[in-house]
Every structure is written in structure tokens, then in C-alpha cells.
Image (cartoon, rainbow, N blue to C red):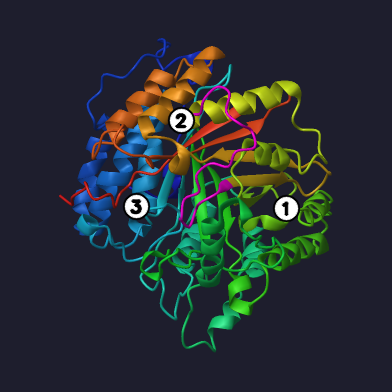
Amino acid sequence: MSMSMSMMSISVETNLEHGTRANGASVVPSKSPLLTQPWQVLALLAQSKNNVDTEFWWKTTGSILGILMEEAGYDLQSQYFGLIFHLHYINPRLGPTGNVAVGKPVWRSFMTDDFSPLEYSWNWDTPKKGPKIRYAVEAIGPDAGTLKDPFNQNSTLELCDQLRDALPGTNFSLLDIMRDSFYDSSAQKSSSAQPNPRKNYWQKLRGQLRAGSKRKSISFSTNSSRSLPEDTDHSSPSSIFLAFELGQTIATKAYFVPVKAEQHGISRLEVLTGAIETLRTHGYPFEAYDKLLEFSKTSHGARLDIIGVAIDCIDPEATRYKIYVRSPESSFRSVLEMMTLGGTIDSVSSTARSELKDLWGSVLGLAPDFSETEELKCEKHETAGVLYNFDIKPRGTSVDPKLYVPVRHFASNDFDAAQGLGTYLQARGRDRYFANYMQALERSCTHRSLKDGRGFQTYIGTGIQKDGSLALCSYINQEVYHPNRRRV
């Protein structure tokens, strides 16, 4: 079987509408074995490559993708389509596995908290469509972390070249502009050593964490570096990711970390603003960005850590720019400040406010009368705090904030977080796929009980829709390097 570019043009007919599977049956919990039929068939191709790393990644990453698609109601043809894409294009680029038994990857990806290079998501269903399965990946090249490729970009750029023909409709015309705006390739030519680009930030933030509510701020406009509290645990200097939504076609996003800030010793806000100015020279006004600049001068905005920017790899006129930031504040009141840009945008109606509060309390296991001003216990971790993104477009003035409820850090355990989400969904008549979601978690989290710890689910992403209801997306980290896992 040739997995050439023509493979990507196969016709895929799915029936994910109105909560039905391909045969029209109602959605019910799957009784399938742990491994899906398409995964088992394609495993023969993975084994034929005679590469211990690619075989390992297929066993781990291919299996969970298969499970997620099956439980989300994808028909067999769609499951094969997604898994063949993953096996042919993504799986070979996940890099050396390192020592899985002791949790020591060769390249410590910033993608996940255990440094594995993939994160999965279950985008919850709507009245007209079933769930969508997405995943983000950092391709890891053979020279990652060396002078040839200090920020691990080469493999991702090679993958983009492959996908230009493989995925009709994918448009990478903005990728080079964004990459050049966030990374200076010439800066490495005269450098004999590459410092950890996340070092100084965490040295400062540790003092904030110890000081609790009295911690001093790290300016949104001056912060330009980050690291784990201990150098032995820091992530590698990741700088570019891709993400894919599986379905009848495969939609692509690209993510950029502003490592030019670390390269030149400037702020990440300066790098981000420079990128916007470059895009403006190409005819895109980005008026909405000015609102974010004003917010960066407020007490809440000045404390934000810029994480990166994501773009849709489509026609530049239609793409969204998602600016990711992390706040050290974790009270619900701070959530409302962020979701309204300090009250400057009217995005949170009374209905939406109630929805956000119920979701926040349900998935984090808070008391019904929890204090909106109380800060949650702060973790000493690279991803501590609360993550948000601000969605803006090339034209127009609207800013659409999105909240990522940090179940990874603040929920009691994965089971309770999932059940809390289920309670929220059931109260709104939105739980028809919840049994399938729980089945997907149980089938893929085989190394431990969901009640035994947290981190398999990382975030519950949410944005406010026009009617005040919440769009929802669950994010999953497979915990490849968890102590209970053993390479087989």
C-alpha cells in the first residue's frame, strides 16, 4: 500500500451529526477492547519499519488516537484515515524515546508536563455535530538541542514541506513570516553555546510563589524567559509546534514560541508586537491587538507571561491569531477580569458568568459557595497559574478570550475532574457523549487509576458563545513518562 500524497485525497464519509455513529445508532459506551481494529491492522506497518522508537511511539500515541476517534463516533474509514496520516507523517518524527522506564526523554518537550511531544484534545459535541479529536505535536529532529538545531525547528519545517502537497487546503504562507518574527536563525551562527531560554523567569517566579498573595509582579512587557524551579527538571527550548484536527479533512494549526526574546534579551511583548507590525506591512491592520496592548498596562495585564501564538494554516484573510498567556492569579475574580479584559469588552453576560462559575467549581471540586476572591493553592511548576488565549483576526476589533481551567494543577484527581465535568454537562442536557469520554479515559489511562493522581487531563478549555453557553474542549496528556509505564 502506497502512503503517497494521493492517500490524503481519499473520500471520507462520516456521520457525526445528531449524536449518532456511522450506522445511525445512538451513542452508547463502547464495548471494544483496549486497542481498536484499525490500530491493530496498521501496527503491522509500524513493525515493518524495524525501528524501536517509531514502534514505541505507534504503540503509545497511535493507540490513544484510535481510542479517541472510536469513542467520538468516527466511522472506520475516518479512523483509518486519521491513523494512516499519523503513522506516515507524524509517528516517524517523534524522536528518540529516551529512557521511558525512568522518565528521561532525550528532548524535554514544552508540549506537556512530562515532556512528551504530544497533547490530545476532545472537542465536545454541539447539537449538530459530534466530538472532534485534535492533537498537537512537537516534531523532534536528530539534531534537536545541538548547534545545528538549538530550538528544534528543522523537523517541523520538513514536515510542513511534506504537508503542503499532502493536505490540500492547508496554507503555510504565513508560517515563514511568523517563524522569522519569533526566531532569529542568524543569531545561532555566531553562538558557541545555547543557554536555557527559560532560566531567569522561574528564578523570579519562585519568589512570587513563596510570597503567596503578596508576591511581586513580573511585567507582561518585560518578562522574556522561563524555566522550571530546578535546572534538572526544565523543559528544552521548544519553539514551534503543529496541531491537527482529524475528520473528513485534516485541519492544521501552527504554534510559535517567541524565543527571539531569549536570543536577543528583549521582552516577549516586544517580539509579539514586532510580529504584528510585520503583518501590518502585509496589509492586515490587526486593530484588535491595540486592545491587548492597553490591557497589558493594567494591574492584571502586567502580570501575564506570554507563552506563544497559534495560527490557522488557511487563507491568511480567514485565519485566527491566538495569543496564549499565563496568569499567576488563580481566583475566579481574576478569571472574570481576564475574560473581559478588565471590563473593556462585553463578553461575559450574567448567563455566561454563571456558566463559567459552575464549570470552574465543578471540575476543580470546589464547594458550591466558594469564594470568588480566594486564590487556589499555587503549584511550584513551569505551567503553574491559569492559561488563557486571546483570539483576534487580521481585520476587525473584537477580542475573544478563552479560559483553560487547570485541572492538571488544581483538581483532586482525574476521575473527580471528569465526573465534575459530567455533572456540569448533564445539568445542561449536553452529556450524550460523556459515557464515551469516560470510556476513552479508562481505555487509554492503563498505567494507573484515574483516581490515583491528576495530570492525564490537563485543561478544560472554554470560550463564551453568542447565547452565553460555553464551548468546551478537554485536553489530555498520555503521561508517556509516568513512573508506572514500562517499555515493552
The residue at the point 42 percent across, 10 percent down is 26
- Residue 146's place in the image compared with 373, above or below, is below
Q: Dot 1 lies on which element?
A: helix
Q: Answer left or right for 216 relative to 6.
A: right
Residue 400 quadrant:
top right
The residue at the point 63 percent across, 36 percent down is: 332
Q: Nearer the viewer, mark 1 or mark 3?
A: 1
412 and 221: which is toward the camera: 412
Q: Position of residue 63 (x, y in %)?
A: 29, 39
| Residue type at tag 2 | Val
Q: Could you tell me which secondary element the residue under label 2 belongs to?
A: loop
When the figure is inspected, residue 43 is found, relative to residue 487, above or below; the finding is above
Question: For mark 1, what is the residue?
Answer: 301
Residue 319, visible in the rendered structure: no
Q: Nearer the viewer, residue 330 or 462?
A: 330
The quadrant of the picture occupied by the N terminus is top left
Left or right of 480 in this view: 238: right
Cα distance between the residues tagged 3 and 2: 22 Å
Q: Which residue is mark 3?
A: 91
Based on the picture, tell me whether residue 314 belongs to the magenta stretch: no
Q: Which residues are magenta?
A: 366-386
Amino acid, disc 3: Asn
Mark 1: amino acid: Gly
Q: Residues within 10 Å of mark 2 (few under 14, many from 20)?
A: some
> Nearer the viewer's eye, disc 1 or disc 2?
1
Foreground mark, 3 or 2, reads 3
- Find numbered disc 3 in the image and state the secondary structure of the residue it sits on: helix
Work out whether mark 1 precedes mark 2 in sequence or the reverse, and give the earlier one: 2
Look at the magenta stretch and give its main secondary structure.
loop
Q: Earlier in the sequence, mark 1 or mark 3?
A: 3
Quote the CA–CA distance across marks 1 and 2.
45 Å
